[in-house]
Image (cartoon, rainbow, N blue to C red):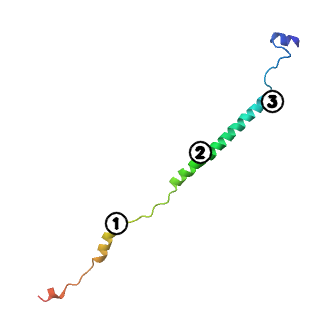
Amino acid sequence: MLDFFYYNEISPQERLGPTGRTIEASLKKRIHAVIALMRDIEKTQTKPTVVMIQSLFEMEEPQKKPLILEKNQVEERERVGFREKSNSQNKI
């Protein structure tokens, strides 16, 4: 066992670095931070943007309003009709 330390040039009193538990704990912290960041982005950016885009595509069809010129033409057509000839022209 002493040969292992001698050949690898390490001391039994020296720390070998982070253990599996400390690495796992630091990874969990980073993962939780990333999850919190993604939730914040979803709440503040993604959902409002999706709602705005949906409202643009789900617009109701505007009511068709006839143009002012069309109204005048329709009124004139209704006024024009068959007229009786006046009696003065028949007497001649």
Give the residue at mark 2. Answer: 45
Q: Which of 48 and 57 is in front in this view?
A: 48
The answer to whether residue 21 is above or below residue 36 is above
Structural distance between the alpha carbons of marks 1 and 3:
79 Å
The answer to whether residue 81 is above or below residue 66 is below
The answer to whether residue 76 is above or below residue 44 is below
The numbered dot on residue 68 is: 1
Q: Horizontal and vertical percent for residue 53?
A: 53, 50
Q: What residue type is labelled 2?
A: Gln
Which residue is located at x 52 percent, y 56 percent? 58
| Residue 4 in the figure: left or right of residue 83 | right
Which residue is located at x 33 percent, y 67 percent? 70
Quadrant position of the N terminus in the picture: top right
Q: What residue type is labelled 1?
A: Ile
User: Looking at the image, do the residues carrying marks 3 and 2 touch, with CB atoms under 8 Å apart?
Assistant: no
Sequence order check, earlier mark of 3 and 2: 3
Q: Horizontal and vertical percent for residue 26?
A: 75, 31
| Residue 82 in the figure: left or right of residue 88 | right
The numbered dot on residue 49 is: none
Crowding at dot 3, Cα within 10 Å, few <14 / some 14-19 / many 20+, comes out as few
Q: What residue type is labelled 3?
A: Arg
Quadrant position of the C terminus in the picture: bottom left
Structural distance between the alpha carbons of marks 2 and 1:
44 Å
Which of labels 1 and 3 is toward the front? 1
Q: Horizontal and vertical percent for residue 35?
A: 69, 40
Sequence order check, earlier mark of 2 and 1: 2
Which of labels 3 and 2 is toward the front? 2
Kindly state the secondary structure of the residue where label 3 is placed.
Answer: helix
The numbered dot on residue 21 is: 3
Q: Horizontal and vertical percent for residue 12?
A: 86, 16
User: Looking at the image, do the residues carrying marks 1 and 3 touch, with CB atoms under 8 Å apart?
Assistant: no
